Amino acid sequence: MKISLTQTFVNSDDSLAVDNITNEFITLKQILISSLLAGQDDKIKRYDLFRDIKKSKVGFVTLNVEDVSFLKKAVLECQPTLVAGQAHEMLENEYVAPVEPVDYQVVNA
């Protein structure tokens, strides 16, 4: 399944969550990377997923169901409730590519 890594988090007041260091919106990619690096179990699996997510330059990553489940557990272990809940929802939604506008030509009959 494809997961969009560019999904952004919101604060409890529905404002967009901003990274205090970079002043950029916090994305699913950032949360997954920090969660994978914080855990202590199955370090090789964590590193493999970290590497795949980190090197993704297209805005999404393709994962199998087991990897998505592993990521959900990793986030639950080390993130606060608001972040964990949003990440869980984001990991449930498969990536859908934006629809490109179609350029229609009008033909006179």
Image (spheres, rainbow, N blue to C red):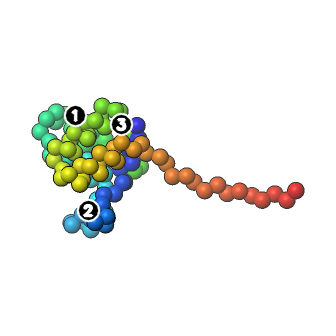
Rendering coords of residue 43 (x, y %): 16, 36
| Of the image marks 3 and 2, the number of the one nearer the N terminus | 2
- Residue, x 16% and y 33% (percent of image)? 42
Q: CB under 8 Å between callouts 2 and 1? A: no
Front disc: 2 or 1 = 2
Picture residue at 22% right of the left edge, 39% below the top: 73
Task: Give the structural element (helix, strand or loop) at label 3.
Answer: loop
Q: Nearer the viewer, residue 21 or 94?
A: 94
Disc number for residue 63: 3
The quarter of the image holding the N terminus is: top left
Q: CA distance from mark 3 to mark 1?
A: 13 Å
Q: Which residue is mark 1?
A: 45
Left or right: 94 as drawn, with respect to 103? left
User: Which residue matches tag 2?
Assistant: 12
Hey, which residue is sitting farthest right in the picture?
Answer: 109
Amino acid type of the residue that numbered disc 2 sits on in the rendered structure: Ser
Q: Residues within 10 Å of mark 3 (few under 14, many from 20)?
A: some
Badge 2 or badge 1: first in the primary sequence:
2
At a point 13% along the width and 35% down the height, the residue shown is: 41
User: With respect to residue 61, does 107 lie above or below?
Assistant: below
Nearer to me, 29 or 11: 11
> What is the spatial separation of the Cα atoms under label 3 and label 2, in whole angstroms?
29 Å
